[in-house]
Each structure stands twice: as structure tokens, then as C-alpha cells.
Amino acid sequence: MRGWARGRLGLVAAVFLLLIVVAMAVAPWIFTPLDPLATDTSQVLRPPGWGHPFGTDQTGRDVFTRVVYGASYSLGVGVGATAAALVVGIVVGTLAGLAPRVIDGVAMRGVEILLAFPEFLIALFAIAVLGPGPVNVATAVGVAALPAYIRVARAETLVVRRAGYVEAARGLGVHPLRVAVAHIVPNTLRPLGVIATIGIGTTIVAAAGLSFLGLGPQDPTPEWGLLLSGGRNLLGQAWWVAFFPGVLITLTVVSATVVGRRLRRAGEGRRS
Amino acid sequence: MIVRRILERVAGMVVVVWGAATAAFLVLKLVPGDPVDVMLGVSAQASPELKQSIRAELGLDQPLIVQYLSYLARLVRGDFGTSYQLRLPVTDVIGQQLGYTLQLAAASLAIALVIALVGAVLVHGRASRGIFSVLELLAISSPPFWIGLVLLSIFAFGLGWFPVAGADGIQSLVLPAVTIALPVAGILGQVLRTGLEDAEEQPFVTTARARGAGSARLVLRHTLRHAAIPALTLAGYIVGSLLGGAVVVESVFARPGLGRVALAAITNRDLPVVMGIIVFTAIVFVLVNLVVDLAYRAVDPRIETPTTAIRGAR
Amino acid sequence: MFSRPGSFRIAGSLALVVSAALVLAGCSASAGTGEKVEGGTISFGVDVDPVGHLDVHSSQLDINAILQRPVFDSLVSQKADGTIVPWLAKSWQVSDDQLQYTFTLRDDVTFSDGEKFDAAAVKANFDHIVDPATESAQASSLIGGAYYAGTEVIDPTTVRVSFSQPYAPFLANAASVQLGFYSPKVLAEHASELKAGGPGISVGSGPFILSKYTPGSELVYTKNPNYNWAPEGATNQGPASIDELDVKILPESSVRTSALTSGQVDVIGDTAPSSLSQIGDGFTVTSTESPGVPYSLYLNVTRPVFSDVAVRKAFAGGFDLDAAVKAVFNDSYQRAYSILGPTTPDSYDAALEKSASFDVDAANDALDAAGWSERDSDGYRTKNGERLSARWISYTPVNEDNANLANLIQDGLKKIGFEVVHDQLEPGAYLDAYLAGDYDLTDWGFLSADADVLRSHLGTGGYQNASHLSDPEIDATLASAVATTDGSKRAELYTKLQQWNAKNAVIVPLYVPEYILASSKKVGGIEVDIHGWPLFSGAYVTK
């Protein structure tokens, strides 16, 4: 692979950015002394400048502070939903891999159909069923991410299942479930970890999209998608309210993708 | 043999649509809350008798299995029920708005194809590969609603080249279509480029070169054809992107269309419309897959196919 | 902020019309600079589509009242000075006991489907409004609710409406579009389709005919060439000048503004105050303060936190409303002092403008005295270990300005240790919470051209009584006010109610909404009614 984005420089930049976003999520107070909810009627819609690097919004809240605090919501949903999907995906995928062929076949047809759609559309349908709300948004994007994990977990299970040591363990009379937990699950983690890294990015965009549509958390929560949608009526007079949250979402997703791809290549290299 | 394959194919399609319809029905039945209350609202002060009569009218007082069977029977006849909110048949609701979304989807797909093809052909084998891969990455990673807002503030609010909203003619179609097209073009471009790189290494390219085919002609005639295969596989995904993108973009650009209908139905818990859209999407998906299968055989002559009749008719 | 074509607003976040007295000879909202041309099209950008709620007799949406006025005529019309003038009724008589209104109708009026307008048509429409199957709350309350006794046909041009007790707002309400007339043929044949509406269904006798309807996108009206029965004194007594009125649905306020400035549409309604700076000199802007109940918070007095009047008053005085309204609306809207808007006829008590004040110390002292003197780790007040906290429910979508105002209020009250949890609920969840009374406060503004709107907000069991107030003295005052026709006597009674609320802080008025209409100078002759809503019967385009 060529090109700087895939080269060292891109990777370093991506890792650095991710670390910053993680730091924002974990310890936002390092970046800003302000309260993301604190309003100030004397500082309404100030353009970016000293004191307010990203400007202020309609109630005088500091946009930079809100973006920083938004990291914990967006990254929280991204990581949380991905982790949950990962766990459920491993369980379901492993079971499907071990299950009789008929059940496995039916489950996989369903998974394949779902895989043919972008996560955002599936998440939207999930919200249609669950109803709007912040928790439901996390659930919906988790559900949308699920099929990919199930498929990979199942494929790895099938491979590992036939491996000598697993056969041997079974031959020794070890319970199949125990074999699964002890041998199959650890082996599926590496490829799944790669998908999950890229998946965090996709999940963040999907969640932000749902929030943007008004289906997720609500003002005054500093969630990135919501911050963006809060600025959409101000485009003509205060572009900064919508612009900066969008930049942060994009950079985070790009970084996660770059790192994920790098991990994937590393994984592929190891295998071949 | 052919008949059997076609039958299998049709049966598979029916099963997918039936599965989607059943899943939509079951899950939506599990949703808490009385749809009649949501329909009427607080200040209507409807008497319990009136509510009961509405419930009976909608068949909501029947046992679940009866509701399910009559739902399926109505689906088969093309009756998707009546919207709680719009008080119109769901088929009318979808039908009225379908045109706008089709226009948008077609325009987006065309733009995405052009961008991806131009990108793939231009970049092919040149040093600009790196720049293009960054652009692709950005296009794929940027949230569509943000792309829409940025385009809107530059080209509509700032420069005034395009109208800010609505669906009046070609001009109003440009920004929304580009918004949806960019991420799709990013994905398509990546796949095409990878496909081209693989195709380069195929023996038929060497043969063609030996026969004196020029580079551009080679790309167009031979390798692109080969590279189109994985791109075609993505068709389902792309259709999904177009539909999902429509929800966001129609909201950002105040365009009428299915996406707006879907969003309104979701926020208003207008269950018949939600079910109708899910089933409709399943039908579209199944049809697209059928078309893709046929296109596969048309694009790549090496694919052995029993449906030579179709190819012959081409 | 989102397009919600199917949105059903109940007693929701936007102002609703309860008593629409339309002023046909209102101020002109547009003055074309060029020469008037016959024919042509005017396009009008609005924020929402009344989709699914097009029936004038059951819809509660302001936007529906605006968009149906061109199609539906009423018995009478109300002028800016409050006087009622003849429209489809040439004259009327009120019995001495004020229980019977007898109208003499014009005999030259036809509906656009060719049906004749007569006494039977009036009866069919009024019967339709009160029919439980119509599911009408608004129109049935406008016609008198429980006071309405019935309508009888005396002869083809004479009709009598009776009441069980005097009902002063009736004539003004009869001018509203909610008490407008459908062709009787439509009522007979399409009753179940009225909510969906559309050409051939939304059929009245007005100056325009709804000729095309694309939900979520546009409504097209063509002129009624036979129209010759405008209200007495209207500038244009004949058919409309323009051939077509094109209504475009543009949900985002920024989009409407740009559509106007770029010439995509000629007129926009519900213009955001924040976007006024972008509308330059080339446009005519009319801003009309809405009569009725201002945008307010309704404190639920049956809940522990707000059962104490001292806590309610501390709440009302504990945040800087002046600064908040100024920050959000930038001087476009005025803060409210009373539970009635200044333009509500025969009622407003201007004296309250001196009384209300923001006083942190007083609020803190009052809360200390009420026993909320301890503080928890988050800085909120507690009493017996329980936090001073109120649950505010709002009906989504919450418009952006109101959301910003809510943030400022929440943040202000936090500073005196009063927690406000703002739950913005989707329709179903809001209804559940509202009906169960599971909230401490909620919010809305309620447009109305008659102060009788307070009866539904403060009267025991009133359908907008979100405060759950039940006070026999208040009920008695409301009842005598609705039965009083004398303007100054009514004003006295309503002043009493406004002052009572100022002392008891049951409703906390926040700001007086205004309907802002902006139009291009390429069009003229658009007049606005008492709500500031546009009337297109005299509109024209210029060269």
C-alpha cells in the first residue's frame, strides 16, 4: 500500500488524534476550565477568538468546551455499542458455528441479508422499532454493527473447530462449550478487534446521524450530532456552531479507520 | 433446469420479503403503548367507546395470529394499511413521495459512478494514488449530514449558486445528490481501484497489451469490466446508502421524499407507515439483487451461467 | 426544527388557536413597489404541513388555520377594532337573554363544487363540529362547548344558534376558520377523508380552491373566479387578483429566509427572529404580537415541590428572564408579564409590567424559609435529604429558541440550588406523562383572540389546565367573565385573574410570541389578521 495516509506519518497522526479524543472523553477538564452547560447571556454567538477558540452558541455556551465534553458521549456510544456488539457477536457467532447445520444456515442467511445494508439504515430501522431516545440510539447502532461480528466469529469458529488441538481437546472428553470458551473465543478476538476499531468510527457516525435527526439525546447534552444540528439554522450567521463538531466527528472517524486498516494489514501479514 | 433455477430464485425472493414483513410485524407488535392513544392525542378527549370503535376498525382487538394473517393477506393484495397520522393508505403515502427519492437516488448514483470512474481511470498507475486514497477516506468518513451542511453553507448560502431547499427542477437536485454521492463514490472508487489493480495482473491484460491495445482503451474495455464485479457486489450496500442518505439529506435540504416520510413515521410512531417502508425496502433489495445477478453475467463473460437465454437476449 | 409532516401537536409547544377572530381589514403586510398586474402566482413558504390534520373542524394546528383561510368562509368577520362585520351572514340578532343568535344569510353564495350555501349548510357544519366522531376539541370548544345547545333551520336564509347559558365569545369565534363551512356534499360523502384533505375534499366557498396537494411538499390554490361575497368593508370585494397561490413547505427557518432572499418564494411565514438581520431592506416585514396566553411554564400545583406557593414564587423570580429573552430573541420578542398577551382584547392588565422582577436574594430567602436550606454535593438545595428538583416535560420537537430559553432557565435556577430536569418527550411518551400528571411543569403558548382561553387553562378540569388548578373562586370568576358581554366589565374580571396568578405563580409567563411575516416587494395587497397571519384574497403581483 502506498500513499502517505497509509504510511507512517498518517498512522502517527491518526493515533495521536485518537489519543487526544480519548483524553477528551476521559478527562475533559484538562482541555477546558469551562462548564459545557454554563450559559452566559452576555456572550451570545461570539465568533472564534481568544477565550472561545470555537466561538459561542446562542446561549453563550463555549462551543470548544461543548465539543470536548461531547467526546465522552460520542466515544462512549461508539465504544460501548461496539463492545456490546462484539460480545454478543462472539457469543452468537460461536454458537452458530457450533450449532447444527440447519440452524447455522438460517442464521447466516439472515446475517448476510443484514450485512448487505449500511449500518445507518439498519440503525434507523432499529430506532423505528425501539422509538427515539439516547439509550435506544446506542442499542440501535450496536444492533446495526452486530451482523459483521457474528459472521466473523462464526467463520473463525469453523476454522478453529477443525484445528488439531480443538479436535484433540474434544477427543479428551472436554465439554464443547468449554472448548469454545477456552480455544475458539481467544482466536476470534484478533480479527474481530480489527473490525471493531473501524467499527467504532462507523458507529460514531451512525449515532451522530440519529442524534442529528433528533432521535437521540436532547439539548443541552453536548453530543456531537446534536451540536451539529443545533447549528444548522445558524449557518448564515454563525457557521462555527455547526462546523467544529463536524470536523471532530470526521477526524475521529478517519483516525479510527486508518488505525483499523493498519491493524488489519498487520493481521494479514502475520497470517500469510 | 432453467425453470427450476428461476423458481428457486423467485422463492428465495419471496422468503426474504416475507421474513422482513414478519419481522416488522412481530417487533412492532411488541412496542408498548396503545396506538389509538397516540393517534388521538390528549385534547381529543375521545370517549372509551370511540376508542374501542377505532380499535375495532383497525382490527386491533383481534387475536395476534388473526391480525398477522390478515396483515399478510392484505400485503399480498398490495394493501399496506392506513397511516395513523396521515389518514391515507400507506401505498399512497409511499407512492406520492417515491418519485422524489428515485430522482435523488438516480442522480446520486450517476454522480457517484462518474466520480468513482473518473477517479479510478485517472489515478490508475499514477503517483496521485495517495491523494485519491485520502480523498476517498475523507468522503467515506465524513458524516453525510455534515457534508450537506458544508455544501449548503458554501454553495447555497454563500455563493447562491443553488437553491437552499425544495424540489424544483434540476438545480435543487444538485447539492442533495452530491451529498449522498460523495461517500458512495468513495466506496465505489476504492473497490474499483483495487479491482483494477487485480485485473492488471490478469493474463488477458497482457494479451491485450500484446495486441497493441492502448492504456486508456485497455482500462475501459478490459480491466474496468473485470473491476466492475466487486463493485456490483456492493449494489445492495449502495442502495442502502442511497436510502439511508435520503433520510438525512431530505431533512437537511427540505426535500420531499421517502426519507422524510420515514423520519416522520418514526418520530410519530406511525406504525403502518414504518412497516410499509420496511417491506418496501426489502422488495427493492430483492429486485436489486436480481438485477445485479443478471448484470454479473452480462459484465463478465467468464462467469458460467445456465441463463444463457438471458444473455442471448441482451 | 425537523420536518414532521405528520406531527400532531396537542396542547403542545407551539401556540394553538382557540378563538380566532380574524381581522380582515388589518394592516397591510406588503406594499408592492411596482405596478399591479392581474393574474400571476404568489408563492408562500411555511414551516410545517398540516398533513393528516387538514380538517378545519378538528385540527388544532395554527398552520392549518392559516392555510385553510383562503378556502373556507365564516358567518361573520372581525375587524381590527373588535367590531364584527357581516360576511356570509348579512345580519344577526341576539335575544335579550343572550341565549339565541339568529343569522340572516346571503342567498348568492355557492361552494366551489356548485352546492348552495344556505341555512341547512350552516346546520350541517355546526352539527359536524359537535359530533363526537369528528374528534374536535378546538372547534367544539369555540362553538361553546357545553354551553352550545344546537342549531336550527328557520328558513333557507335564516338560521338560529342556541346556548344553555350566555356565551360572550361566540360572535368573535364565529369569525374563525375553525367555524368555517364545508360544502354539505363533502360532509355527506367524504366525512372520513376530511383529516387527510386535498382537492375535492377540502371544499369551501372561499376566494381560493385547493387544487393540488403534495404532503410534505406543497399546496396549490387556484382562484375562485365566481367569488363575490367578501366580508363587508374588505378592500377586494370580487375574485382574487392572482391566479394561483403556491404554498411551499420549508421546515428550517434558515432555509425559509434564504428562499425569500434568493427569490425562490415571495412570502414567508413564521420567520425566525434570529434571521431578521439577514432580511434586507428589499422586503416588507410585519411582526404581530400574538393574543392569548403567552409562551409560559405551567407549574403542577398537585405535586409536592410546587404545592408550596413560596417555592413557586422563588422559581418564577429565581432566574433572569429579561436577560434570557433578550439573549434568545435579540429584542424581537418581548418578555411576558401576564398570563394574557397585551393584544388580547378587553383583558390585558398592564399594571403587572411594574410588578414582576428577578431577585436572587428574595428567591434564596424564600427557599431557605420554606425549609429547602441544606445543600447536597452538587450544590442543589435539599429538605429532609430530598433534592429540590422539578421535572419539566416538553412535547417534541422543541423549537430551537425555546430550547435555548430552557437552557438559560435551567442554568439560572441551578445557581439558586433549584434543579430542573428537562425531559423532551416524543408525542406518545409526552401524552403518557401528561395524562398521568407525572410532571412538575410543562410549557406552551396558546394563541387566542379571546381571554376566555383562561377558562381552559385555569378552570377546574379545563382541557389545557396543566397546572391541575382547582379553585372554586377562580372557577366562579371565569364563569362570570364568559357570560359578560360588556367589555370593561370583562376586563375587570380578567384583571382580577391576572393579578391572582401574579401572586400565586401558577403559570409563569415567559415571552409574547409574534407572528413574523416577510414578503418581497414584488407582491402587494397581502393583509394580516389579528394573529399576524396573511390573507391573500386581495394580494397581487407587480411588474
Image (cartoon, rainbow, N blue to C red):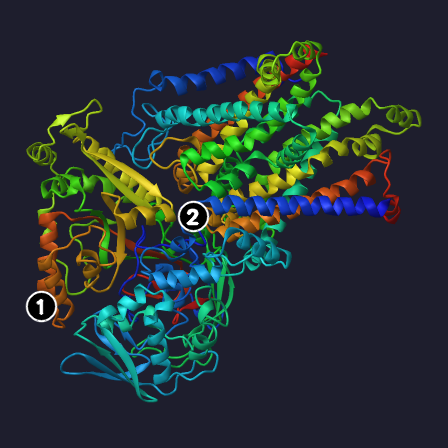
Q: Secondary structure at mark 1?
A: helix
The chain holding disc 1 is: C
Q: Nearer the viewer, residue C230 or C495?
A: C495
x 47%, y 33%: residue: A139
Which residue occupies the extreme right position in the image? B211
Which mark is in front, 1 or 2?
1
Query: Percent position (x, y) of residue C229?
Result: 37, 81
**Rendered image: mark on residue C21:** none
Kindly identify which residue carries mark 2.
Answer: C252
In the figure, residue B303 lies in which quadrant? top right
Which residue occupies the extreme bottom position in the image? C155
Q: Earlier in the sequence, mark 1 or mark 2?
A: 2
x 66%, y 44%: residue: B16
Q: Considering only vertical position in the picture, is C167 above or below C309?
A: below
Give the amino acid type for the residue marked by disc 2 in the picture: Glu
Kindly identify which residue carries mark 1.
Answer: C489
Q: Considering only vertical position in the picture, is C126 above or below A262?
A: below
Q: CA distance from mark 1 to mark 2?
A: 44 Å
Q: Nearer the viewer, residue C22 or C412?
A: C412
Q: Secondary structure at mark 2?
A: loop
Crowding at mark 2 (Cα within 10 Å: few <14, some 14-19, many 20+): many
Query: Percent position (x, y) of residue C135?
Result: 36, 65
Query: Percent position (x, y) of residue A145?
Result: 55, 30
Give the amino acid type for the residue marked by disc 1 in the picture: Lys
Taking the image as shown, residue C416 lies to the left or right of residue A123, namely: left
Q: Nearer the viewer, residue B167 or A55?
A: B167
In the figure, residue C314 lies in which quadrant? top left
Query: Percent position (x, y) of residue B198?
Result: 78, 24
